[in-house]
Image (cartoon, rainbow, N blue to C red):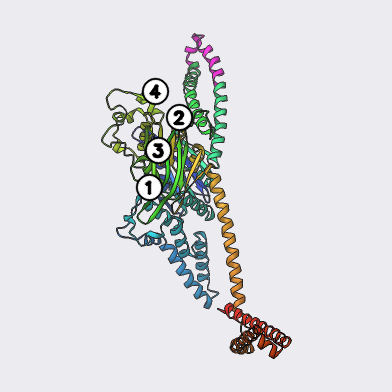
Amino acid sequence: MALLDLIGLSKAYETNIVLDEIDFSIHEGERVAIIAKNGGGKSTLMQICQGSLDFDDGRRIVQQDIKVEMLDQQPVFDEGISVKDAIENELKELKSAKERFDEVSLLLAKEFENKTLLSEHSQLSAFLDLHNAWSLEDKVERILQEFDLKIYENRAVTSLSGGEQRRVALAGLLLKKPDILLLDEPTNHLDVYMVEFLEQILLREKFTLLFISHDRYFLDNIATRSIEIEEGKIRSFKGGYSDYIVAKEALLKSMQKSHQTLLKLLKSEEEWLHRGVKARLKRNEGRKQRVLQMREEAKKNPSVLRKMKLELEREQKNFHSDKNINRKKMLFEVDKISKSLGDKKLIENFSMRILQLDKIAIVGKNGAGKSTLLKLLLGDLDVDEGVIKRGEFRIGYFDQQREMLDDDKNIIDIFCPNGGDRVDVRGKNMHVYGYLKNFLFPKEHLDKKIGILSGGEKNRVALALLFTKKYDCLILDEPTNDLDIATINILEEYLQSFDGALLFVSHDRYFVDKIAKKLLIFRGDGLVEESFQSYSEYLEIEKELKTLEDLSSQESQDSKEIKREQNRSVKLSYKEKKLYEELPPKIEALEDEIEEINNCLSDPECYQEKGLQELHQLLQNYETEYEKLVEQYLEIEEKIEMMK
């Protein structure tokens, strides 16, 4: 039985039909990914499922007591509430259930046949099992650590950045575990290690999930089903993004085959239509209408097929198509640079060269110094030590704040500041609408002001503007944030054909694998490493190494624990205690005797008087006794050390 159903549901914004009589259900344990272009209805569908947005027609049915909750793009918190309190506020119901469970358990110890208590105990146990709420304090601590929020736990949430506030909201929802969790771009503002933790918790805790993400590896790892919204309709595909691409290709082939069949039928019917008189008879009017309908469908199909084919071709291009172009031109020479911010060491004694056509991804944890390196290369920050030599070349920069855009200007003014409606793109003169159509902007958007666009639309404008300029080097900071997959495919196509150097910061593993030929890995504490592995391969090896370290650490810990247990059982006997007190003076006395004999053996008068053979025998006896007493003493001392 479905937890939530949408039946014959429609939603339009003025004349724009976003959802057109759709049917959609989500069942317990399903993890459903929504795939569509920006503005295609993803957020609309999610908000309707949440119950926060009205619809025009149809029905929304939610099973009794089912709770549907959503991660907001811009969560709101009470003024002054701390990070830890904000997370724990989401757990009030679970904590209350655990306290009541403990109370009922105590009561049942006295009234073990009380049916009312037994029923309540069973219900509470099932509720706590469902939400895995048996050790909430431990789980709060773990999520604070994994989402890098531990250092902020006592700070007001409102004093944090927008990305950090989203992590706080996400942490609370994950621990609360609603019956249906809705996540809109949950991997934004998370580094790859946080994304990996998020994947683990979603799979381990068996969430029922409806989500939007541009992270294609996240889609593959998490989704049990993908739904595509296109022209107001929904198609459903089993599995994640890779399965979706395969199924979409099969659908394309089927549509192409159907189109060929349609063309043959249309040709036959067109011949009939042109024969004349019979076509105008009333009884044939229906057949005539069918021909006209087929004609319109045949006109429309090629554009639909071409669009689908283009998207698939973009997706299925080779990840790393090399070109035999001269790579010798050097753009940057970085020589033994170091940079700290406050007490935090970001880069230490790092050197590298950046050459023409290098495609370099800069990766690592949030706050490790990735964006700082970009600013050092751009000259916006100065190094503490070392030198960065720059050649004479043009740099294009895309930043997360989109500072190159003016909110007061229209889109067309941004691209055509001197008037007109033409724009140069890589030496090709294009109509601005024809160019922006590649970035999924309809014609009516050209007069819109930048300030009223969504974050994703602003990113698309900024990227489209970037590619109209002539640059030798592109420096991009998180270019895929707020973009849909269709736009990311377009971005990838532009970057793969870009004939200059490319440096970019990204946490999108799929994007990095597809574009980068080299990695700069920020390991923390100033350490930056170069690698020619794919990002996925590097992360997999890093994970395996960590597993080995954890196993080794556990074995070492187990060994120490065994030794401690053994040591706890060690005790001195009465005889050993007595010897420990008596041996030192005996050993010292023997040392004096041995020294005296050795002195005598060095003096001819002495050893002639006492006899050389007798002295040697006496020395041997003393040394044997000395070694025996010292060995006894050391054994007792070792036992005492083990007891500490």
Q: Distance between the Cα atoms at labels 1 and 4? A: 39 Å
Secondary element at tag 2: loop
Name which of mark 4 and mark 3 comes first in the sequence: 4
Q: Which mark is residue 73?
A: 1
Q: Is residue 257 left or right of residue 52?
A: right
Residue pointed to by mark 4: 427
Q: Is residue 212 visible?
A: no
Magenta segment, which residues? 262-283
Of label 1 and label 4, which has the lower sequence position? 1
Nearest the viewer among 355 and 112 is: 355
Give the distance between the C-alpha atoms of the residues marked 1 and 3, in whole angstroms.
26 Å
Callout 1: SS = loop
Residue 483: percent from left, percent from top: 41, 39
- The residues tagged by marks 3 and 2 sit, at their Cα atoms, a distance apart of 14 Å
Q: Residue 388 location in percent, x, y?
A: 39, 41
Indicate the quadrant containing the C terminus: top left, top right, bottom left or bottom right.
bottom right
Q: Nearer the viewer, mark 1 or mark 3?
A: 3
Q: Which residue is mark 3?
A: 475
Q: Is residue 127 visible?
A: yes
User: What residue is disc 2 on?
Assistant: 499
Q: Nearer the viewer, mark 1 or mark 4?
A: 4
